[in-house]
Image (tube, rainbow, N blue to C red):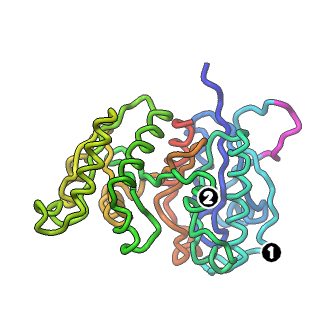
Amino acid sequence: MRAIPRIGITLGDPAGIGPEVVVKALSRAEQLPPAVYVLFGSERVLEDEESALGLRVFPKPWPPAEAGPGPGLYVRRMDLPPGHPAKGRLSAECGRASFEYFAAAVDEATRGTLQAVVTAPISKQAWSLAGLAWRGHTEYLARTCPEAIMAFWSEPLKVALLSHHVSLREALGRVKAEILEAFFLTLDRSLLGRTSRRFHFLVAGLNPHAGEEGLMGSEEEEIRSAVGRARAAGLDIEGPFPPDTVFRRALGQPEVMVVAMHHDQGLIPFKMAAFKTGVNVTLGLPFIRTSPDHGTAFDIAPRRTADPESFFQALRLAAELS
């Protein structure tokens, strides 16, 4: 019999839509796979959100008094930030709180007491105001897992990013055969360890028309060399393909994943295809990490009109991959 997974959930930035989408998604708990769901965050923030939304999720204290807790929702109480944060307002205090929620869940997952962590959105600006050295979740995870890969998962389209939260100039500098080959091998190994599928990888070129045989750039030679080496190592991989058509080749193909050369090359088509249901997945870790494919949305946070579907799907995928 399959063991019941333990899945950590972080509230995200208390001033953003994180607490809202968490409460809305967990109010549909009966539609989620059976698991021990452990919420890391402030009970005050959670109660404020429940009151504003007119919903209750009824978590029990974590850790529970009994050994071997059964499926259900629990809360690991963390009294940050102090007071009642103002919705929609960027602050160092909320940045620090969102980091502490996340770091505590990651610590538990690293020690093996959780099999997955599902993260509500944080603000990179708020983390910077709090004096934190990391730009976001993935960068923090990469400090101990340098092979961490940012990927995006949905029924219509799946995408993995060679680089993510760096400038375009820095991203272009990473399109080198040795870096790409290592990336392809790590990606394939990570997926084999989590799913029963063997993925077919379609690799995007960098330049228009995939370089047009060198007329529009030479980076495709680096990509082509890395693809050849990865194929020789046993991967099911092709490319480079013109970036403006490769995503159409993968659309609606559940066992096909596009490898994009940089953040916007992969995220623009992905969010066009699956913004409401897409999930951000960090691969290459000893545990699963998922999150919704949107940010804190400070502009709409006070209105409580956020759609929780992406976060709900992140919970489902975490349970499935666990």
Q: Which residue is the site of mark 2? A: 143
Dividing the image into 4 quarters, which one contains the C terminus? top right
Q: Is residue 277 above or below residue 113?
A: below
Q: Is residue 154 above or below residue 306?
A: above
Please, what secondary structure does the residue beneath circle 2 have?
loop
Q: What's the residue type where badge 1 is placed?
A: Gly
Query: Looking at the image, which residue is at 52% across and 36% down?
Result: 320
The answer to which of 194 and 312 lies nearer the viewer is 194
Mark 1 surroundings: few (<14), some (14-19) or many (≥20) residues within 10 A = few
- Residue 217 in percent (x, y) is at 18, 68
Query: Looking at the image, which residue is at 64% across and 39% down?
Result: 115
Residue 153 makes an appearance in the image = no
- Residue 264 in percent (x, y) is at 35, 66
- Residue 118 in percent (x, y) is at 60, 51
Mark 2 surroundings: few (<14), some (14-19) or many (≥20) residues within 10 A = few
Q: Is residue 279 above or below residue 3?
A: below
Query: Looking at the image, which residue is at 62% across and 77% down?
Result: 128
**As drawn, is 243 to the left or to the right of 191?**
left
Which is closer to the viewer, label 2 or label 1? 2
Q: What's the residue type where badge 2 is placed?
A: Arg
Q: Is residue 199 above or below residue 223?
A: above
Q: Which residue is the site of mark 1? A: 83
Residue 64 on the magenta span: yes
Which residues are drawn in magenta? 60-67
The answer to which of 14 and 241 lies nearer the viewer is 241
**As drawn, is 215 to the left or to the right of 30?**
left
Dividing the image into 4 quarters, which one contains the N terminus? top right
Please, what secondary structure does the residue beneath circle 1 have?
loop
